[in-house]
Image (cartoon, rainbow, N blue to C red):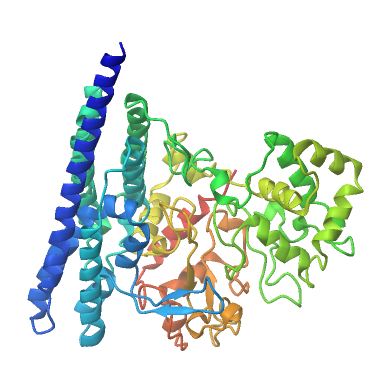
Amino acid sequence: MNIACNTKDKKTLTTSISNTKKLENIYKKQLVTAYQYLDSIHITNTKAINLEHYKKSRKAFKLSEPILAFIEKENYKSLNSPNLLRIHEEDPTDIKINTPIGYQVIEENLFTKTIDTLVFTRAVNVTKNRLKLIEKNTNTSNLKNYHILWLIRDAIVRVATTGLSNFDSPELGASLQESSYNYSTLNDIISIYSANFSNKELLNQWQNEIKKTQQTLNTNFDSLDRFTFIKNHTHKQLQLLNNTQKDWNVTFPFSFAINNNATSLFSNETFNLDYFSDYKSDTTHLKTKISIGKALFNDTRLSINNNMACATCHIKDKAFTDGKVTFNKNLKRNSPTLTYAGLQKSFFYDNRSGSLEGQIVGVVTNHDEFNSDLEHIKKVVKNDEKYATAFDTLYKRGATDMNIRHAMASYVRTLNAFNSKFDNNINNKENTLTALEKKGFNLFMGKAACATCHFPPLFNGTVPPNFSESELEIIGVPQTKENKKLDDDLGRYYLFNVEERKGAFKTPTIRNIELTAPYMHNGVYNTLEEVVNFYNQGGGAGLGFNVPHQTLPFDNLDLSTEEQSAIIAFMRTLTDS
């Protein structure tokens, strides 16, 4: 009996090694092709020749993307990041500002009237050498079956959330074709692991679905119905992935941002809330913890003068905003929505806090808010019999300041309803989306380029599929709605005085945006029409302001009045019920 088991185990191990070797071979071949074509690009060539080499290199890069982005996350980000300075502020004593490299830098330089030869040559050489280094040091032998399923899921989510929007194809606008390249590699991976399928019909379903998906992507950029694509393809593939997990008998060791059993991008069951917390609680009494967190959220005794609670600034009926231009005369910014706030990694308009638990400290100690300290909060909780008993029951260490903040943060992490009209329609719970609203979503994801900063499904700046980074943008917000003067709030700049961060603010969610007026950090605009018009004109630079590091993708969007109305109609479908 042991001999039979050992024979079976050896056969399984041999098959696994064979699969990962085949995977490595196609991956390395794609990397080699990518850097060989980059090696053919030279400043002395004509633009047409360089462009042709670039397209072939880019195709190979995109074919490698599902694997590269999974096993080389940081390198992938560098190779495929926007043509913007990369600013590293992790160590305040050693701020690093790096010149960008990668395909977007090369692409944008290929389309400029006068190429900056130094920037162009450096981008090509560094990108090429980085790809060579990755290829030389690649070893996929440690990949397990659950890694393969994670890899496939990441690729599916990446296409739906960034691939459909020209996020990384700024000049060629080739994102649909490049998304199809991703699916070609997924088809190769499914074929390599075909022996894993005990249910051959499931294997056929995958192959047919990938074929249909590529047929759908074979269309004009502005013509693709992205709503239907996600509804009929992305979600179907997530379901197939769940079925594959069961068929392969895969057990996941843990969960990343997206739950391993997610079948929709737009559900309160999509995300793993623990991933977004910097504190792993030892309590299993989730409902009680949330209940206590909610009570604390509404308790004015936490402020030094007993006159302010979290709920004072974050009003439920206003989607947990304050509904003001700025909260008071001492503050330059208004209170952002807390809905879906728990599904991100950075907080405050300037990203200065890395968790909800940390964000609470900022509010508590701010002289213009709670004007208190953590010791005061502990005292309030311990002197309240209900609170004290609850914390002694819930947590081994009782009412520590960390446990108190964790309870409050746990409540905030429940404010993700995913039950808006849009969510219900894309999840097939109802069929009420109008043609105008659907058109607005497709414009938002396509021509208007809104989704290149407000990524679905959260529609904020937290970048999928890893959801580990919340982007900052410089858009040139005016001081008044007459658009005559640039706002003097410099945002992120105040943290480290980095010139290139002047005017940088976190990209907020547009979920519940119908309830969160006035808009922008300074409440400059009262209506969504004013907001969309601002972007349509090209942000601050389009209004004539000097915004040297503006990050908006176009000078202007050239949206018609009808198209602007459609986008607004879509945004209003994101109001939770």
What's the residue at 19%, 63% (across, down)? 58
- Identify which residue, 135 or 84, lies in the foreground: 135
Q: Nearer the viewer, residue 192 or 104?
A: 192
Residue pictured at 72% horizontal, 46% vertical: 407
Residue 522 appears left or right of 146: right
Residue at point 28%, 54% (across, down): 68
The answer to which of 332 and 574 lies nearer the viewer is 332
Quadrant containing the N terminus is: top left
Image x and y of residue 493, in percent: 56, 80
Residue 341: x percent and y percent? 59, 55
Farthest residue in the top direction? 1
Where is residue 483? Give x, y as percent.
53, 83
> Which image quarter is the C terminus in?
top right
Front one among 178 and 522: 178
- 503 to 129, vertically: above or below: below
Q: How many marks?
A: 0
